[in-house]
């Protein structure tokens, strides 16, 4: 069966699962339920993000750190296989040799319980206005989600948490509130943009990898936005073209402050009001533009 036929047979759209909205035909409840007791190893690494918050970038950095032999020029293995999503293909990753590197968009309520006792977590948060714009473009680019061409309608859905990933506010606030329960490194997407080299050093040090300057520089260069956008290893639309529209890119702009190209003044003010209400107890600061 071809990919186009698979799309037609799949009941597309979102379904709710423990505070997060996931994709029918991509995520499966039985599979998700099994994650609670999924055995975490001492050296497992999980990069956790809300969607469109630097996920691919972090996967790419982890791939260069741990799977460099499969990240050479001409390599075609997707980084989604090198750093797979916990919620997508657990059957495959259960048998991977250590060190296992994972990614996840899951809320706190859905992660393996063993992650509180073993393994390491890298949590990346991005300012929610840029997240909303990036997710809006993704929803209209991928065929596995119902398109929503009106940004205002999408923004209302985003603020209610009725989009892929559920509520950004709940995701970030809950992980931040419980960060002391994990061996965790917390970064913001904007800080990674401002000082990519420093972010790579912090990540490698957190993971116990002492890298020389040349290796760090190589990782910074290879994981640059320009290089990732040109590398099919990191682009789902190149790996699974039938699931995406022909025009567009899974890796789009990555700019801090791109929300200003979409938000009206009224939308921004309303967003700010809700942000202040929901995040008032979270001492986390974002750069809204650079």
Image (cartoon, grey):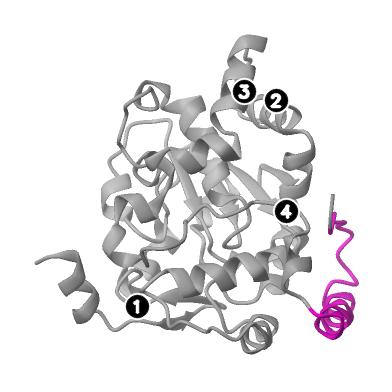
The residue that mark 2 highlights is 201
Q: Is residue 3 above or below residue 9?
A: above
Point 21% across, 80% down: residue: 8
Q: Nearer the viewer, residue 77 or 209?
A: 77
Q: In the depicted view, which residue is nearer to us: 61 or 107?
A: 61
Quadrant (top left, top right, bottom left, bottom right) of the N terminus = bottom left
Q: Which residues are magenta?
A: 264-288
Q: Residue at x 73, y 40 (%)?
A: 192
User: Residue 114: horizontal and vertical position, in percent?
Assistant: 51, 51
Name which quarter of the figure residue 243 lies in.
bottom left
Rounded to the nearest angstrom, the CA distance separating label 1 from label 4 is 30 Å
Tag 1 residue = 24
185 shown above or below 72: below
Q: Is residue 265 magenta?
A: yes
* Residue occupying the far left of the picture: 1
Which residue, given by chain and number where applicable, does mark 3 sit on?
Answer: 208
């Amino acid at each position: 069966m071809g990919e186009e036929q698979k799309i037609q047979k799949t009941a597309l759209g979102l379904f709710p699962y423990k505070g997060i909205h996931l994709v029918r035909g991509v995520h499966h409840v039985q599979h998700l339920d099994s994650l609670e007791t999924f055995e975490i190893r001492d050296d497992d690494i999980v990069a956790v993000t809300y969607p469109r918050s630097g996920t691919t970038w972090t996967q790419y950095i982890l791939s260069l750190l741990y799977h460099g032999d499969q990240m050479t020029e001409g390599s075609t293995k997707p980084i989604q296989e090198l750093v797979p999503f916990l919620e997508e293909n657990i059957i495959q990753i259960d048998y991977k040799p250590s060190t296992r590197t994972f990614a996840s968009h899951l809320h706190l309520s859905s992660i393996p319980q063993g992650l509180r006792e073993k393994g390491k977590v890298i949590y990346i948060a991005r300012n929610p206005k840029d997240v909303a714009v990036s997710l809006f473009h993704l929803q209209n680019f991928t065929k596995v989600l119902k398109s929503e061409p009106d940004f205002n309608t999408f923004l209302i859905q985003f603020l209610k948490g009725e989009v892929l990933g559920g509520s950004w506010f709940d995701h970030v606030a809950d992980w931040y509130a419980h960060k002391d329960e994990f061996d965790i490194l917390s970064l913001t997407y904007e800080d990674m943009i401002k000082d990519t080299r420093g972010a790579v050093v912090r990540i490698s040090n957190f993971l116990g990898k002492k890298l020389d300057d040349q290796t760090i520089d190589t990782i910074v260069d290879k994981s640059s936005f320009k290089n990732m956008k040109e590398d099919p290893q990191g682009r789902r639309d190149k790996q699974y073209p039938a699931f995406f529209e022909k025009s567009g890119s899974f890796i789009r702009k990555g700019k801090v402050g791109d929300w200003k190209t979409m938000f009206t003044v009224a939308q921004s003010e309303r967003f700010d009001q809700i942000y202040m209400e929901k995040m008032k107890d979270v001492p986390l600061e974002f750069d809204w533009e650079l």
